[in-house]
Image: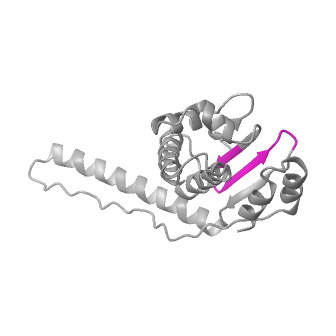
Amino acid sequence: MRLEIVSAADFLVHLLRLQAGQLSERQLEMFKSSLTEVLRHRYRDHWFPDRPNRGSGYRCIRINGKMDPVIAQAGANVGLLPTVLHSLFPSELTMWIDPSEVSYRIGENGSICVLYERTEAENVEEISQQQQQQHQHQQHHQQQQQHQHHHSQQHQQAPTIMPSPSQQQQQQQFETCKDSLLLEHTQFSEQIAAYVSS
């Protein structure tokens, strides 16, 4: 979940950064940190790596006639007004943040572009780590129960294994995305195409 959220937050901050001089670097970094935390909290119980489409609508970020409430909340946390943020983003933006893939569309009829796509090996590793953590949690719970029933036993806590952040993001490029950006959104087109290509 971490890589997907970071990928989405990086892209949204990049869009804000394209509006030169509107927000300071400090404001952008504070917004990115707030957005990352809001998304992590929001998705905590709505993230299913073994069934990535489950909950996709809940995780979708949408800016159209009004500001997405998740982005508005992240901005409000750092003193940015929703009206200011709404004016800085494209008028039509949809972003899907799902396990293994982050994609977006600018404009109602724009092409869907993939920002981040996880490899199958990374998926297997994440699911395995989650299963390990669940197993360790169950072992820890069983140990606590044994300790309560047998006061003579010493309480042992299962070690916690944190997922390694060593996996690199892989970005996939689609020419149709760049083409649609160039045709439909000239104010963002070159910068977004360059970002997607990087």
Q: Is residue 93 left or right of residue 129?
A: right
Seen as rendered, the residue at the extreme front is 21
Q: Is residue 130 left or right of residue 70?
A: left
Q: Is residue 105 magenta?
A: yes
Seen as rendered, the residue at the extreme top is 65
Q: Is residue 173 above or below residue 41?
A: below
At x 56% / y 59%, what residue is drawn? 3
> What segment carries the magenta color?
95-109
Residue 11 picture quarter: bottom right
At x 78% / y 61%, what residue is drawn? 193
Q: Is residue 174 above or below residue 17?
A: below
Tally of numbered tags: 0
| Residue 70 visible in the picture | yes
Judged by its main secondary structure, the magenta piece is strand
Front-most of 26 and 164? 26
Where does residue 30 sit, x and y in percent of width and height? 47, 48
Where does residue 73 sit, x and y in percent of width and height? 52, 34
At x 65% / y 52%, what residue is drawn? 20
Where does residue 51 sit, x and y in percent of width and height? 65, 48
Q: Is residue 81 magenta?
A: no
Task: Point out the image quarter for the C terminus.
Answer: bottom right
At x 70% / y 36%, what residue is drawn? 62
Front-most of 49 and 102? 102
Front-most of 189 and 33? 189
